[in-house]
Image: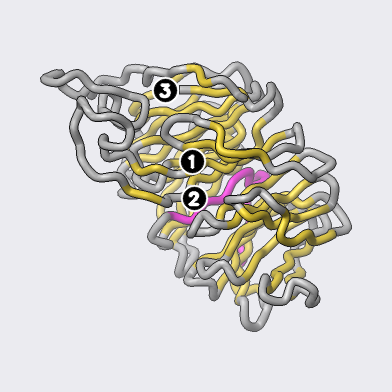
Amino acid sequence: MAWSHWTETIYQIQACPVLKQDGNSCEGNRARNGAAMRPLDICGRDGKPMLRQGDTGDWIGTFEGHKGAVWGVALNPQATKAATGAADFNAKVWDAVSGEVLHSFQHKHIVKSINFSADSQLFVTGSNEKVIRVFDLNKPEAEPTMFNGHTSGIRHVMFFRDGTRLVSCADDKTLRVWDCSSQEEIHKLEFSAIPSSLEVSQDGTVITVTHGNIVSFWDALSLEKIREFTVPTQVNSASLHPDKTIFVCGGEDLKMYKFDYTTGTERESFKGHFGPVHCVRFSPDGELYASGSEDGTLRLWQTTVGKTYGLWKCVEGASVVTEPLAPPKQEVPAN
């Protein structure tokens, strides 16, 4: 399944669980098939981030107000607020229901990454200023807490460990962990290539990093390497399945790859995009994964091909496909 984002490059996507529907009938409609209904927050070069329904592609709304490419998006855990960071040197917090701007935070350079704390009280930004800022959304006029240490532009930053830590990666080829109370750097990893993506697993125990043509996995507590695997292309993004059995990744060769997390064996690879893949993410329930590309489309792929979910309808009595077949895709208009 794929839809266009106004033919502009897609830089980042995020899915958030907001409602679980009951029932599992193959003959039921979308409200009865057991799909976890969630919005997808999508950003791109056109400067108009949008919300779409994660299982159908239905347009929910567009956030209008930025004057440059939007590099980062985030939804709070309750899916009541959205956040964006852009090339106009601004980070904005939006009401995800009404689409109204709640707060706007001026920076001195491009804002590449934003994230909410688990309780939605704090908001963190990373920018090309090489500085991490944490804002208290209850006191938006107050000066932010600053974290300094990176020597190049920051690519990704997020809260983890129940909001007591921040983890960031930057063009200085490092990943750093910060103590939120002391504002001190407490861990640093160095890579031979710029880390292009960063993900913390849903249970908070594993950090996934892509760098060069390598996907590596790190213990979130000790920051010791768990394992790493070399993939057939320069990889831009990877995502670990919630049950930690597989991971998916995409990069410069336009393909989506699925690998066994334990052995690193390639299970499947799919063609579909017509440009490099910039971001991939599993849905919170692990039933789908999304990929955003230079070609201006975002595509949804079934983790288990042939299973009823969202717009995918199974045939009663048919067995679930386990062979590596390309997931079926449907085109959804962008309007």
Residue plotted at (52% across, 41% down): 40
Q: Secondary structure at mark 3?
A: strand
In the depicted structure, whether residue 71 falls above or below residue 328: below
State the separation of the CA atoms marked 1 and 3.
Answer: 16 Å
Work out whether mark 2 precedes mark 1 in sequence or the reverse, and give the earlier one: 2
In the depicted structure, whether residue 274 falls above or below residue 62: above
Residue plotted at (57% across, 21% down): 254
* Mark 3 neighbour density, 10 Å: few (under 14) some (14–19) many (20 or more): some
Q: Which residue is mark 2?
A: 208
Q: Secondary structure at mark 1?
A: strand
Q: Is residue 86 left or right of residue 24?
A: right
Labels in figure, total = 3
Q: Position of residue 276 (x, y in %)?
A: 62, 25
**Pointers 2 and 1 in contact (C-beta within 8 Å):** no
Q: Position of residue 62 (x, y in %)?
A: 66, 39
Report the amino acid beneath label 1.
Answer: Arg
Q: Secondary structure at mark 2?
A: strand
Residue 281, numbered circle? 1
Q: Position of residue 135 (x, y in %)?
A: 71, 70
Magenta stretch holds residue 305:
no
- Magenta region: which residues? 188-201
Is residue 173 visible in the rendered image? The answer is no
Q: Which residue is mark 3?
A: 269
Name the mark nearer the viewer: 1 or 3. 1
State the residue in front, 133 or 122. Answer: 122
